[in-house]
Image (spheres, rainbow, N blue to C red):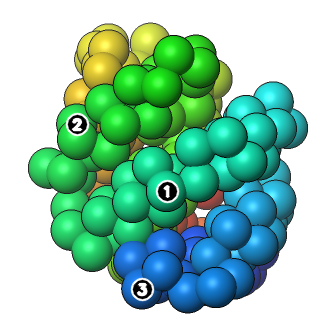
């Protein structure tokens, strides 16, 4: 599971840099990243492809700025931009996109976000899953940290948040 997430992270890193630098192939790299692995569901991929067509500059800017910031603190601005064009995208999809861009920045620090996994995990441990994309991502990272702190099994070894998310 880790290997395909790391390959996806490389694609997200490439897409983030391309968006930030306004490279001529930024749109293609972003589409390739969104289809890498199973980190972004097919409905969200379709939404993104449509927004690349009808709001290309806004999409490029939003993804490029989050990549440049490389921080959960920038997720509020990112998700606000994605939701500002009158084309609905769910908070879970906005969170998943943000998590993937950040995963591309640092795959040891960030983990992919999957709404069902995060909610199930929150319910299991009695913690809130968050309501905004930033809160959801912060909660996921806290869940990963908590699991790593309490992990007592010898295998698998939880090297980082990416590993923790994989067993969550």
Residue to which mark 1 is pinned:
57
Pick whichever of labels 2 and 3 is earlier in the sequence.
3
Report the label total.
Answer: 3
Crowding at dot 1, Cα within 10 Å, few <14 / some 14-19 / many 20+, comes out as some
Residue 137: quarter of image: top left
Left or right of 74? Residue 113 is right
Pick whichever of labels 1 and 3 is earlier in the sequence.
3
Q: Quadrant of the C terminus?
A: top right
Callout 2 secondary element = helix
**What's the CA distance linking mark 1 and mark 3?**
12 Å
Residue to which mark 3 is pinned:
21
Q: Position of residue 123 (x, y in %)?
A: 44, 12
Pair 2/3: label in front: 3
Evaluate whether residue 125 shows in this view: no
Residue to which mark 2 is pinned:
76
Pair 2/1: label in front: 1
Left or right of 37? Residue 121 is left
Q: Quadrant of the N terminus?
A: bottom right
- In the image shown, does 121 or 79 lie closer to the viewer? 79
Left or right of 156? Residue 135 is left
Q: Is mark 2 in CB contact (under 8 Å) with mark 1?
A: no
């Amino acid at each position: 599971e880790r290997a395909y997430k790391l390959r996806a992270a490389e694609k997200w890193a490439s897409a983030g840099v391309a968006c930030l630098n306004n490279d001529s192939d930024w749109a293609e790299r972003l589409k390739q990243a969104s289809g890498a692995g199973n980190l972004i569901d097919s409905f969200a991929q379709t939404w993104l492809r449509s927004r690349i067509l009808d709001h290309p500059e806004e999409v490029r800017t939003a993804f490029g700025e989050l990549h440049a910031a490389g921080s959960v603190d920038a997720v509020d601005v990112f998700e606000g931009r994605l939701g500002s064009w009158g084309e609905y995208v769910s908070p879970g999809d906005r969170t998943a996109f943000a998590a993937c861009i950040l995963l591309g920045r640092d795959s040891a620090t960030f983990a992919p976000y999957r709404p069902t996994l995060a909610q199930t995990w929150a319910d299991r441990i009695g913690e809130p899953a968050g309501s905004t994309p930033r809160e959801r991502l912060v909660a996921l990272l806290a869940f990963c940290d908590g699991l790593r702190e309490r992990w007592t099994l010898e295998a698998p070894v939880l090297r980082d948040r990416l590993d923790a998310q994989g067993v969550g």
